[in-house]
Amino acid sequence: MGRTNCIEKVELKKGPWTREEDQKLLAYIEVHGHGSWRSVPAKAGLQRCGKSCRLRWTNYLNPEIKRGKFSTQEEKTIIRLHALLGNRWSAISTHLPKRTDNEIKNYWNTRLKKRLTRMGIDPSTHKPKNNPGGSAQSRQAANLSHMAQWETARLEAEARLVRESKLSYKLQLLRKFTAPPPPPPPHPVAPPCLDVLKVWQATTTNNGFFSLPETLESPTSTLNFSGNNSTVPTVSAPDSSIIATDVIPMDNSNASGVEEEISYAQVKGKMGNSMQPYDHDNNIANTTDFDHNIVGSIDFVYANNNSDNYNIASAIVGDFEDNKNYWNELLNLVSSPMESSLF
DNA sequence: AATTCGAGCAACCGCCCTATT
DNA sequence: GAATAGGGCGGTTGCTCGAAT
């Protein structure tokens, strides 16, 4: 009853696909499309079940698929989305163009999961594996796990901000279609997600640091946000290691609004000389890291090694459009269908 | 040079959901 | 409403290959 299984069909081949089989399947789909997968093997002259053909196509033969090494940005996206969505690989894959759910799943299981484990982070919960009174190494692991915890909290908060911004944008749209048109604005109206950047900019203090509004606090975060309008969120740390990371908007656009490259000196100028930049792999960043066309979303972790209060900082430079799209897609996942129906 | 071991990944398995009859 | 077909999805397996011994 119900569905049939490949193995119920006798005389069907299993195991690795041969070059000839690949060519047959490719040739058939290029001409006819796949249509009903069940009918594909017979029409293409293959001794395989339809399901096997579908998997071979979607995970390997489809020319739309991008193969090869995952970029740092892709890794970050996977980790962020896994924290939000868990093992929903197909949902995660929708945020990684041209990557298949199978490839992402394999990459997670063979690399990212192990990496997080080594960092002292439980890959299933994205929370620290605490070891009270442990060694400096374990404390550092806890600190690193704190980074993940903070990242999760920040995701939630930013997704909320985007949602609120979208709500505001919808109200604007409603007004637009129910009221006489307002006088034209001096500049084009920004897409909704750029409101997040406005929030960021509004909370950016004179030296370019990010000061989180109270509404961004998360119950899952142990970060201590002082009520004053000081520069950087701080957290008490047990030792002088990297403690957390956050994205700080560094407005490097010129007068025309065009993003420009940012130099090491500019970054250090904004962060202050007492802070040390680190890269994603927790290596100390040097000038060469900054000197080569830094445009795009690049995070650097800054730690003040001389104080109990650790400045949480990281630079995001340029490519706001990518971030806008990223948050739009992320929001579409976490928001209700009703809410996203307008977009 | 031979063997062992582990990482990476393609492919399979079984369950679930939806559409159709 | 039940039976069936088809496809999607996540978990798991087992093969391949390179590094280590």
Image: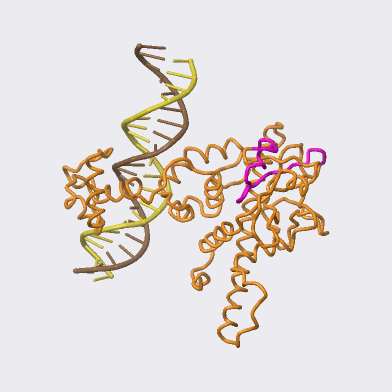
Chain colours: A orange, B brown, C yellow
Is A288 magenta? The answer is yes
**C8 or A293, which is in the foreground?**
A293
- For residue A312, above or below residue A341: above
**A172 or A226, which is in the foreground?**
A172
Q: Which residue is situated farthest in the front direction here?
A: A256
**A125 or C20, which is in the foreground?**
C20
Residue appearing at x 47%, y 40% in the figure: A69
Predominant SS along the magenta part: loop
Q: Identify the magenta region.
A: A282-307
Q: Can you give x and y, in whole percent of width and height, for residue A282 in the image?
A: 65, 37
Q: Quadrant of the N terminus of chain A?
A: bottom left
Q: Can you give x and y, in whole percent of width and height, for residue A60 in the image?
A: 34, 45
Q: Can you give x and y, in whole percent of width and height, for residue A81 in the image?
A: 53, 52
Horizontal side of A12 relative to A187 (left or right) equals: left
**A317 or A247, which is in the foreground?**
A317
Horizontal side of B8 relative to A248 (left or right) equals: left
